[in-house]
Image (tube, helix red, strand yellow):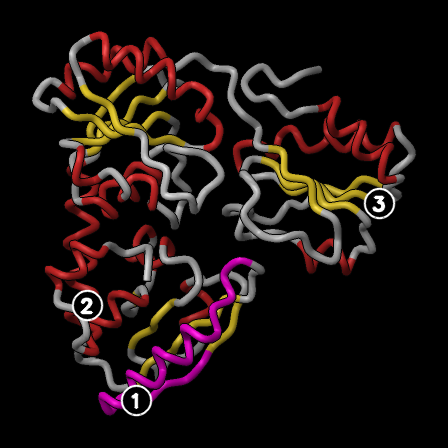
Amino acid sequence: MKSSTFDLEERRLKEEVRKRGAKRVLFQLPEGLKPEGPRLASIAEKLGAIAIVSADPCYGACDLAVQDAESLGADLLVHYGHSEMMPQQRVPIIYVEAKTEVSVKATVKKALPLLKLYKRIGLVTTVQHVDMLGEARELLLSVGKSVAVGDAGRLKYAGQVIGCNYSNAKAVVKDVDAFLFIGGGRFHPIGVALATSKPTIVADPYEQRAYAIEAEVQKIMKQRWSCIREAEKAKRFGVLIGLKSGQKRIDEALQVKEKLKKKGKEVTFLTMREVTPEALIQFPTLDSFVNTACPRIALDDASKFRKPVLTTNEALVIIGELTWEELLKKGWFES
């Protein structure tokens, strides 16, 4: 039975398993696609492979289950829901982007009243909807808007954004008055707004509605300012080094540690795959943390942590290399 919402490329899956002679396949899916795991596994099983579905969270293309595949003896990792970002690893990887088959036209129409004050619109989306940006662009042009779709060359598709990379939005930020994000949820459009400081409207084709996210962005900004001010008082810092394949930034952690030490701070390195409040609470002598792994952890989960967890750029404010105003201009996601 085929998914009614996403193209999971079952035919390609069969061809790849056959062509590679895969004997053990590990499937990795983000939360919204995990229900499809058993069905996809059965496809590989019918071709004679042992199929295993990862039940762990999957946060993006930076979160490849390569070590899990190796430990399980898998000879193929099938990663769903994201475009290729990491180079091929010791275990061969197939990326299945899972593009949506849901039309965006009706929802973009619902967004037009929210865009009436803005003439120049930047279009952004996730990989699931990149093929529909042309349709959205034509609709906006038909009502007198000018449209910009950025291509900074750092992601696979023009107009594409991912959780920690908004370079395509920033590439056109001077040419637009507001952004229209096409896709589900608030995670990515909040990132667009934080990265660009521009009004951002969401056109959600799954919920069939359009809305602004300014209130949520303002709430996060206040939280970030509060965290920075509290962390300024800290004497002992934990600098977090992520162990996930696309989040391991040891050189960045070393630089942060050296800069904090020059400011008279005590620093301890901590490594972890999952940055959670439960993990950090085990280190009560540390006053604050700097996370060099995924920057969204500090931004989206701030209220869950008992002590400040800063991004690398926020740590530069404490160190004195950036002011708050410069941080707003530079953004939280790119060094």
Q: Residue at left 74%, top 44%? A: 26
Pointers 1 and 3 in contact (CB under 8 A)?
no
Query: Are there few (<14), some (14-19), or many (20+) residues within 10 Å of tag 2?
Result: many
Query: Are there few (<14), some (14-19), or many (20+) residues within 10 Å of tag 3?
Result: many
Q: What distance separates the C-alpha of mark 2 from that of mark 3?
A: 47 Å
Q: Position of residue 140 (x, y in %)?
A: 24, 14
Residue bearing the label numbered 2:
228
Q: Position of residue 172 (x, y in %)?
A: 24, 38
State which quadrant residue 16 falls in. top right
* Residue stretch in magenta: 246-269
State which quadrant residue 117 falls in. top left
Residue bearing the label numbered 3:
24
Q: Residue at left 25%, top 86%? A: 235
Query: Are there few (<14), some (14-19), or many (20+) residues within 10 Å of tag 1?
Result: some
- Residue type for callout 2: Ile
On whether residue 253 falls in the magenta region, the answer is: yes
Q: Secondary structure at mark 3?
A: strand
**In terms of sequence position, does the residue under pointer 2 or pointer 3 come before the other?**
3
Q: Which marked residue is nearer to the observer: mark 1 or mark 2?
A: 1
Q: Residue at left 39%, top 76%? A: 239
Front-lying residue, 135 or 236: 135
Q: Residue at left 56%, top 61%? A: 244
Front-lying residue, 50 or 278: 50
- Residue type for callout 1: Lys
State which quadrant residue 304 falls in. bottom left
Q: Is residue 273 visible?
A: yes
Residue bearing the label numbered 1:
261
Pointers 1 and 2 in contact (CB under 8 A)?
no
Q: What distance separates the C-alpha of mark 1 from that of mark 2?
A: 17 Å
On whether residue 270 falls in the magenta region, the answer is: no
